[in-house]
Image (cartoon, rainbow, N blue to C red):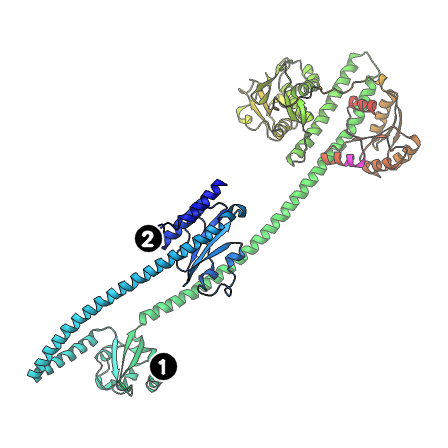
Amino acid sequence: MMTTQCKAEVLGKLFVIPGTLCILPDQQSIVDFVNKALNQIVPGLASVHFCLEGTVRSTTSESSIRCPDCNTNWDMPSNITRICTMDLASTRRLPLRTASKLYGFLIYSVRSLEEFLPYEPYVANLANVVAIELERRSLELTRRAVQDQLHQVLQELESEVVDRTAELAQRNAELEKEIQSRNSLEKALRLSEERYRSLTIATTQIVWTTNPLGEIVEDLPSWRTFTGQTEAEIKGHGWNNALHPDDRSEVMMSWLQAVKTRAAYNIEYRLYRHDGEYRHVAARGVPVLEVDGTIREWIGTCTDITEQKLAEEALQKSHEELEIRVQERTSELAHTNEALSSEIAERKRMEQALRETDRHKDEFLAMLAHELRNPLAPIRHALHVLKKQNHPDPTLEWGHMLIDRQVTHMARLLDDLLDVARIIQNKIRLKMERCDLTDIIAHAVEDCLPLIEERKHHLVLSLPDEPQWVEGDATRLEQVITNLLNNAAKYTEENGKITLTVMQTGIHALIRVEDTGVGIAPDLLAHVFDLFTQADRSLAHSQGGLGLGLTLVRRLVEKHGGTVTASSAGIGQGSTFTVRLPLLPANQSVDDSMSTHMNNTSASLLPERRILVVDDYADAAESLTMLLQAEGHEVETADCGIRAIEQARAFRPQVVLLDIGLPDLDGYEVARRLRTLPETRDAVLIALTGYGQAEDRNRSQSAGFDHHLLKPVNFEKLSGLLASA
């Protein structure tokens, strides 16, 4: 409050101090000074501008306000002047008015009205001070101008007096000589006449004179020199014969009309030159009047304007040519625009076709995954049934393990293919939560251990004792570690070494996977994370793959705010992949409850359930039924949606394993209807399908499914869901 009062007092007193504004040299300096003071002292102002009658305005860095309404009606009463356009723009103005005149306006806009209000009276007072100083400065300028004009007039009068005195002295001398000798006077007259004639001949213009009736009575040397006519030929109206035949009538009528009305004579015509060429001339004549107003004579000039006419004609021709060129160019641009429009339309059509192709591609990938998962499901079901036979034959056990690995491998390839498609289209969604990297790595190692053991690799783990907490999708992070370990196992020859190290560096966790495998060539190192990139090496071909794993690793890591890099000393030197992920702050509360593993409850401990299997693929339904019956469950099957609803009413299942792609009603519609039946309203609905994209999971959840499992189903996971049902 004290600061505001202090500034207000400074502003109020600053411009009443004698000499504050008087010492400034001109109006522009006053405006600059006041504008700078207002901007420095008064808070809440957005901009300040002076709109004066002259050219003085604010010199602030902002663009000058142009107000046509403020440049007119300076002395009109404010109650009849139009509303200023600046007022319509929510800009305030204060008149710079004195008792005698309105000098302009102080225009300002307010950024903060609350801050500005205490200063408004001071700004109004400032406007009066500036107006008074502008009036004083204007009067001073007027006084100085009058003094300068008076001084100049006095100098001119003094010079004229001197000249007239000298002229009179000369005239007196001439008169004395005239009195003394008539001959001297006649000689002077002849000399004056000769000088006049010399001047007429020397000028580039034609000078002519006529009597009051418009007839030539005296010799015109300059006319004769230009046209080649004799003195006798030009007398009277004979001069008209030197004009172009097409112009004579019009020129004569115009001349006689000017003589009759005693008006100034102005006309252009073509005049014959002595060398045979007609030249364009501009003729101008005025009457010389006597004291009583009668015409004493006519005097005029003819100016050769041929060059000007030629320039105008050339300019006109140039304009016509330019107009033709503009029309031609406009036509060309119209054709170009038409071609561009056609090209744009074609590109839009191609873009639409590409979108349609991309959509068909997505549909094809989803259908491909579904169709490929269907035959994998009965294979895995049959494998589980065979495993329960407890044959001691090692060959059978080897075959079981081989089939299980290959089915898992094919399922993973399908998952990678669909995941890459979803990531590229930015359709993948992460379920972000607080998780421990140690648990994630433990699960990933458990998944990859069969492949590592098969290839007889030595796995070395170096994990920190303390939990490494990150925020991310645990499933996707486990997928990152699994892909890196599988990649190391595939590209490392048997009896190799794989090292997985986790360490903390500042606010990041480093996960490093090193192997002693075939390495990466320098030219491939920069592209190892690109889509469908594979090294051209025999080991890679022997292991197969689509070149998707590392692409998934990079995209998933980036979605978690991390980075992944690859390094290798070259072919045969092994490779290293390093993942950097941001750690959560150490002071954030830690959930000490460790994530629990999937309940590996044995089949013998699972409670018996009534289960309805709905699948139109006979092998899948039959094999899953056999597997569930071997676990002790009561199972019935249906191969379409209608039969499923009918059997559900009679069988009253506790769990329904329902395929999505059915021949009559799709699985979503069947689930919605089952939720309305009293027999299955509380049943556990599990989608068992080959459709695994995000929109498929969202639709299944909206339709009433409790779980969404992909074929071939992991029977341990299914057993866990059945146990908790």
Which is nearer the N-term, disc 1 or disc 2? 2
In screen coordinates, is 134 left or right of 578?
left
Residue 327, compared with residue 553, is above or below; it is below
Q: Position of residue 38 (x, y in %)?
A: 44, 48
- Quadrant in the picture for residue 278: bottom left
Decide whether the magenta segment is chiefly helix, strand or loop.
helix
Q: Position of residue 122 (x, y in %)?
A: 46, 50
Residue 157, compared with residue 36, is above or below; it is below
Q: Is disc 2 placed on a helix, strand or loop?
A: loop
The answer to whether any part of residue 640 appears in the image is no
Front residue of 369 and 130 = 130
As for residue 701 lying within the magenta part, the answer is yes
Q: Is disc 1 placed on a helix, strand or loop?
A: loop
Front residue of 357 and 553 = 553
Q: Magenta residues, as a range?
A: 699-704
In screen coordinates, is 713 left or right of 253?
right
Report the quarter where the C terminus lies. top right
Residue 347, compared with residue 300, is above or below; it is above
Residue in view at x 32 percent, y 62 percent: 142
* Mark 2, other Cα within 10 Å: few <14 / some 14–19 / many ≥20: few
- Quadrant in the picture for residue 392: top right
Residue at the spot of label 1: 246
Q: Position of residue 394 (x, y in %)?
A: 78, 12
Residue at the spot of label 2: 25
The label nearer to you, 1 versus 2, is: 2
